[in-house]
Image (cartoon, helix red, strand yellow):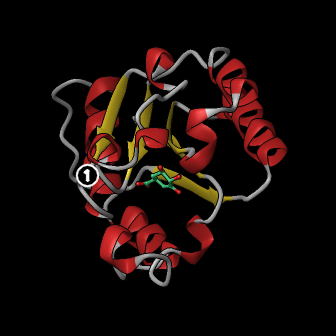
């Protein structure tokens, strides 16, 4: 069954690759999107980024009716956006909260995620590759044991 995975990215991730490369690496967000599409095994990937909280919320709302799973890197919104959490609570499919860096080994302001209690799973510290791992994980959550070879 072809699945639709919505991948959302929060503020400052538009500068991935140039932003604190010692923490986030040199892979750009466009590179990450291309990697995700290539690794989707023929499933549909919608990949978006915004520095605006309301856009993330609107996209989650769209996903309620159109997506099978959400992978979200809320970036700084992770730690204070109740509005994004409220939107995610309406989504009935798997939700993966993803962080490129290991937020728990960083400054204390990055340690308390508002999203984690409502996420199916949380990933942090895998770098850009985390997006690929998250795609594999949600496809297996949706269709356990299904061949992920391109149909
Ligand atoms: C990205 C950000 O922009 C930070 O605000 C988070 C997250 C970490 C990441 O590692 O992808 O704290």
Position of residue 46 measured from the top left corner of the image (x, y, whole percent): 59, 54
Question: Can you say which quadrant of the picture contains the N terminus?
Answer: top left
Q: Is 24 placed above or below 75 here?
A: below
Q: Mark 1 points at which residue?
A: 125
Categorize mark 1 by other alpha carbons within 10 Å: few (<14), some (14-19), many (20+): some
For the point 56% across and 15% down, which residue is it? 92
- Looking at the image, how many numbered discs can be counted on the residues? 1
Q: Quadrant of residue 121?
A: top left
For the point 39% across and 20% down, which residue is it? 120
Q: Quadrant of residue 150?
A: bottom left
Does the rendering let one see residue 127? Answer: yes
Position of residue 51 measured from the top left corner of the image (x, y, whole percent): 73, 59
For the point 76% across and 30% down, which residue is it? 61
Who is closer to the viewer here, 90 or 146?
A: 90
Residue farthest to the front, as pictured: 108
Mark 1 and ligand 1: say if the CB distance to the nearest ligand atom is below 8 Å.
no
Would you say 34 lies left or right of 74 here? Answer: left
Would you say 117 lies left or right of 21 here? Answer: right
Position of residue 127 measured from the top left corner of the image (x, y, whole percent): 28, 61
Position of residue 28 measured from the top left corner of the image (x, y, whole percent): 46, 79
Would you say 89 lies left or right of 125 here? Answer: right
Does the rendering let one see residue 2? Answer: no
For the point 49% across and 84% down, which residue is it? 18
Q: Quadrant of residue 84?
A: top right
Would you say 7 lies left or right of 11 here? Answer: left
Q: Is 98 placed above or below 93 here?
A: below
């Amino acid at each position: 069954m072809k699945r639709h995975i919505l991948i959302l990215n929060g503020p400052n991730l538009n500068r991935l690759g140039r932003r604190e490369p010692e923490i986030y690496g040199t892979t750009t967000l466009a590179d990450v999107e291309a990697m995700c599409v290539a690794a989707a095994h023929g499933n549909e990937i919608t990949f978006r980024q915004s520095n605006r909280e309301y856009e993330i919320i609107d996209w989650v709302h769209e996903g309620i009716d159109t997506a099978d799973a959400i992978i979200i890197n809320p970036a700084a919104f992770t730690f204070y956006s109740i509005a994004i959490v409220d939107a995610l609570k309406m989504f009935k499919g798997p939700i993966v909260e993803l962080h490129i860096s290991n937020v728990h080994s960083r400054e204390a302001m990055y340690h308390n995620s508002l999203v984690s209690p409502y996420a199916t799973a949380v990933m942090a510290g895998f770098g850009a590759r985390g997006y690929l791992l998250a795609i594999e994980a949600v496809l297996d959550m949706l269709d356990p044991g299904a061949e992920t070879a391109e149909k």
